[in-house]
């Protein structure tokens, strides 16, 4: 919290986390403005889209706290900066993480720009992360609640963005956030946490993607062989490590172990699968990442021991950055990592400090 009282614009999503963030800032004596961001249009009447209810909940929270409230439409910026890239990546056979791009391009760029026009000194969100200034630089820290830490999604934030950003609940645990909301009489104190990609929500993913990427059936083959065990609807609809929705149970001559996606051939329109969660084709000890973004002006050191995640909620994995250039880096893990997926982000940490990361370009499986 800044000691000097100032105008702060809080991104109110309708959820309990952003509501408590606004409440704490208000209690600290700041002039708080709640801002609801509408980032998606086109199917608001769909049973899976909650934007209308989100807006109602956000407005109700602002009324109870006693702060100004505004709704702003960033749907055009979102479609241009985030969704277009999302589709490009899927067409290329990769699995992107649009929430990472949404944070860097919308929530901490378009939103920040709008807040500055309103005369704000800072913006604030309900993310479980922390910011501090250390030796003249801004650092992004993990949230205190390790089960809710969201620094993975924030790793592309820059020094100017962090300098203007507050995470008022980053030092709290989720149970504490709900308790504060309940005691304050916030109407959304028991609201269920949202899950899934922001613009897809809880709807069936393949059904949504088929609106933009046409189905293209092809063979499902056993990895490393020409053996066909089923048909897929389009390699873009599947991701490495996927188990559900393959439709290839009970293959003659195969064991009863579950099948997993182990590779995609976008040129030949072939989906490769293996049996067993620990199959070597699913394990990788090294990867190459591109489109790098480091929070500090100084990138990490090559050959130092760090920790990294290749997906959200993954446990920190010891690693070294073996090769580092301005364009890409090679990350080598002490132990094999499961289902390292091109298009996802690898995020590097030094203890609880998030250093940044990049987009996974290639992986080296134990069986290529």
Image (tube, rainbow, N blue to C red):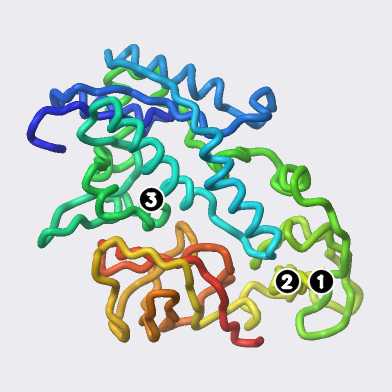
Is 87 or 188 nearer to us in this picture?
87
**Mark 3 vs 2, N-terminal side:** 3
Q: Using the numbered discs, state the Cα–Cα distance from disc 2 to disc 1 in whole angstroms.
A: 6 Å
For the point 67% across and 30% down, the residue is 42
Position of the C terminus by quadrant: bottom right
In the rendered image, the vertical position of residue 141 relative to residue 181, given as above or below: below
Give yes or no for contact between labels 2 and 1 (Cβ–Cβ under 8 Å): yes
Residue designated by label 2: 264
Tag count in the figure? 3
Q: x, y percentage for residue 146?
A: 34, 54
Mark 2 falls on what kind of element? strand
Picture quadrant where residue 20 is located: top left
Residue designated by label 1: 270
Q: x, y percentage for residue 362?
A: 57, 76
Label 1 CA crowd tier, 10 Å (few <14, some 14–19, many 20+):
many
Is 260 or 350 nearer to us in this picture?
350
**Left or right of 4 in this view: 42:** right
């Amino acid at each position: 919290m800044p000691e000097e009282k100032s105008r702060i614009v809080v991104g109110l999503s309708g959820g309990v986390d952003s509501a408590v963030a606004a409440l704490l800032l208000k209690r600290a004596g700041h002039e708080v403005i709640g801002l609801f961001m509408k980032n998606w249009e086109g199917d608001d009447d769909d049973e899976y889209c909650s934007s209308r209810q989100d807006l109602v909940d956000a407005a109700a929270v602002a009324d109870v706290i006693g702060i100004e409230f505004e709704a702003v439409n960033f749907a055009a910026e979102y479609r241009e900066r985030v969704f277009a890239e999302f589709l490009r990546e899927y067409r290329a056979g990769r699995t992107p993480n649009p929430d990472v791009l949404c944070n860097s391009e919308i929530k901490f760029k378009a939103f920040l720009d709008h807040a500055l026009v309103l005369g704000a000194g800072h913006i604030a969100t309900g993310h479980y992360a922390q910011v501090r200034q250390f030796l003249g630089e801004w650092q992004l820290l993990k949230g205190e609640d390790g089960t809710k830490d969201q620094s993975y999604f924030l790793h592309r934030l820059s020094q100017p963005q962090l300098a203007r950003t507050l995470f008022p609940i980053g030092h709290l645990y989720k149970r504490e956030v709900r308790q504060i909301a309940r005691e304050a009489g916030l109407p959304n104190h028991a609201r269920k946490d949202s899950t899934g990609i922001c613009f897809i929500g809880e709807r069936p993913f393949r059904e949504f993607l088929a609106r933009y990427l046409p189905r293209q059936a092809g063979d499902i083959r056993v990895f490393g062989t020409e053996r066909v065990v089923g048909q897929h609807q389009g390699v873009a609809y599947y991701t490495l490590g996927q188990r559900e929705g393959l439709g290839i149970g009970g293959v003659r001559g195969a064991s009863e172990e579950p099948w997993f996606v182990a590779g995609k051939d976008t040129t030949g329109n072939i989906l490769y699968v293996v049996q067993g969660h620990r199959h070597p084709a699913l394990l990788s000890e090294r990867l190459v990442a591109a489109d790098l973004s480091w929070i500090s002006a100084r990138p990490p050191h090559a050959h130092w021991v760090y920790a990294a995640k290749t997906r959200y909620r993954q446990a920190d994995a010891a690693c070294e950055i073996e090769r580092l250039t301005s364009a890409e880096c090679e990350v080598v893990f002490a132990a094999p990592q499961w289902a390292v997926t091109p298009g996802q982000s690898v995020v590097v940490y030094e203890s609880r400090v998030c250093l940044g990361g990049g987009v996974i370009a290639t992986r080296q499986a134990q069986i290529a």
